[in-house]
Amino acid sequence: MLAVVPPPVIVRAPAKVNVHLAVGDVRKDGYHDLLTVFQALSLNDEVTVAVADEPGIEVVGDSAEMVPADFSNLAWKAVEALAEYVGRDPKDPKVRVHIRKGIPVAGGMAGGSADAAATLVGLASLWKLEIGKDELADVAAALGADVPFCLHGGTALGSGRGDRLVPVLARHQFHWVLALDHEGLSTPSVFKELDRLRAEGEPPRVGAVEPVVEALATGDPRQLALLLGNDLQAAAVSLRPALRRTLRAGVDAGALAGIVSGSGPTCAFLCQDGESAVRVAAELSGVGVCRTVRVAQGPVHGARVMSVEEAP
Ligand code: C5P
């Protein structure tokens, strides 16, 4: 009798921006304690997992050549981790992973973490696992600090390494313009640069998180714009001084405010509404300060299996 092979599963994996990112001290494990508010944005990778005799991983799309298409990819580590967790052979999981990049690579928007989260969600469906959200979040946290949020989506307060999450109410949709840089920045080097700046002096620190949570609850972009903050921004700008010009150009183009997204170098600009975001994006792309621009809104769902109608 022929075995029935389940059809491939396609998962949409959203990017994130940190609307507030407070970085604490470096810990014994090399990570920094964080207090951060994440928001998932409508800028996606698409991850397909399929049963295959020959295991492997392919990456296509924007800047795909910069992503390892081998077993060092975090998405493959997700395959191995979940296989091990459910008692399958991690060395021969009989799957292929296909990633279509839309999230900037090494851009401070959790692209690699989003792919790992999407792989977990996709495999849970492909393998018909009876696995709870909390269990999947534990597997996710072992893969990287941002992976649990990429599963969770929406808007959330993260503490610890950024992996302990509490949902945050965000009323309405917020409209963002993202300025993508020509080259990525490595997250560890940006954290290291912040440590260096702090050893030398006192780079600016973000304020309290409570007003940010309140602004998200009101849904007023003007109120949130005044409160956007990222402790890693000084470090990203120190490593990539041209970001100063990009940040200015977004505001000159009509954005309410701009910040470096996570460890950068992508800059995220909050806009009054969808129409304003389209205008800002058009103007910013004409100034020549970045490689390309994208418009996105948030919050959106975390990594989710796409329905048959949504699938390409
Ligand atoms: O967990 P992930 O692999 O995404 O983190 C990448 C790097 O970013 C870590 O190795 C560490 O250097 C830095 N990091 C940190 N503190 C955090 C999160 C990340 O220092 N809370």
Image: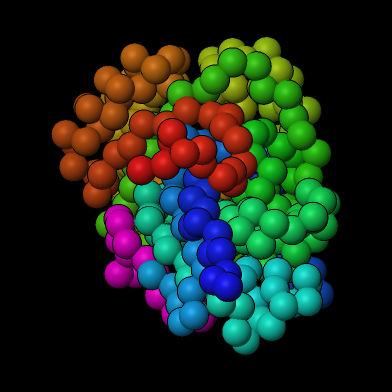
Q: Front-most of 271 and 298?
A: 298
Q: Position of residue 284 (x, y in %)?
A: 25, 32
Residue 210 appears in the figure:
yes
Residue bounds of the magenta highlight? 59-76
Q: Which x, y percent locates residue 141?
A: 74, 61
> With 109 as the anchor, is 78 left or right in this view?
right
Q: State which quarter of the image contains the N terminus.
A: bottom right
Residue at the far bottom: name it: 91
Between 257 and 113, the residue placed more toward the observer is 113
In the figure, 69 relative to 265: above or below? below
Position of residue 57 relative to residue 118, above or below, is: below
Point 40% across, 75% down: residue: 69
Name the image colouring.
Answer: rainbow
Left or right for 216, reference 58? right
Residue at 54% from the left image edge and 29% from the top image edge: 298
The C terminus lies in quadrant: top left
Residue 108 shown in magenta: no
Residue 31 point in image, percent of width and height:
72, 67
In the rendered image, residue 136, in percent from the top left (x then y), is placed at 76, 57
Q: Which residue is depicted at the point 60% across and 35% down?
A: 301
| Badge count | 0
Residue 260 visible in the snapshot: no
Q: Seen in the image, is 271 located left or right of residue 31?
A: left
Identify the residue at horizontal 29%, vertical 39% (top origin): 293
